[in-house]
Image (cartoon, grey):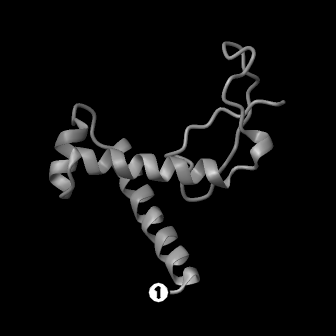
Amino acid sequence: MSSLTTKAAVQYRLGEWAAQIRDCQNRPEGMSVVQWCSQNGITKANYYYRLRRVRKSCLEDLPEEMIRFWPEDIHNPPPVKMTMPGAAAVCHILVLPL
């Protein structure tokens, strides 16, 4: 498989996983992740693996200057909204000015 085809397949899979994660996050109140996973044919471990992969992909798409892991004043961050198409409900990213 060519590199371009592989990238397209990975992006397609990440999109599917992001949709599953959104569905799980919007599950009925009182339903656990384990119950949701059981009803949707995936294991809890696989759900969290997919969640990690989708979040990692979101972070990789951010410009490096927007990522700051140890802010000086994390308790009073300025309000910043950032929309990431296809994964906005999955990636919870705190964006702080440098």
Residue that extends furthest to the right in the rendered view of this protein? 98
Q: Residue at x 16, y 52 (%)?
A: 39
Residue 61 image position (x, y, % from top left)? 66, 55
Q: Residue at x 80, y 42 (%)?
A: 65
Residue that extends furthest to the bottom in the rendered view of this protein? 1
The kind of residue on which mark 1 rests is Met
In the image shown, does 50 or 34 lie closer to the viewer?
50
Q: Residue at x 47, y 86 (%)?
A: 1
Along the horizontal axis of the image, is 85 left or right of 63?
A: left
> Is any part of residue 88 visible from this angle?
yes
Up-down relation of residue 11 to residue 61 (above or below) = below
In the image shown, does 12 or 25 lie closer to the viewer?
12
- Number of disc labels: 1
- The residue tagged 1 is 1
> Is any part of residue 26 visible from this angle?
no
Up-down relation of residue 41 to residue 47 (above or below) = below
Residue 38 image position (x, y, % from top left)? 15, 50
Q: Residues within 10 Å of mark 1 (few under 14, many from 20)?
A: few
Up-down relation of residue 1 to residue 72 (above or below) = below
Along the horizontal axis of the image, is 3 left or right of 40?
A: right
Residue 33 image position (x, y, % from top left)? 25, 39
Q: Quadrant of the C terminus?
A: top right
Q: Give SS at disc 1.
A: loop
Residue 40 image position (x, y, % from top left)? 21, 56
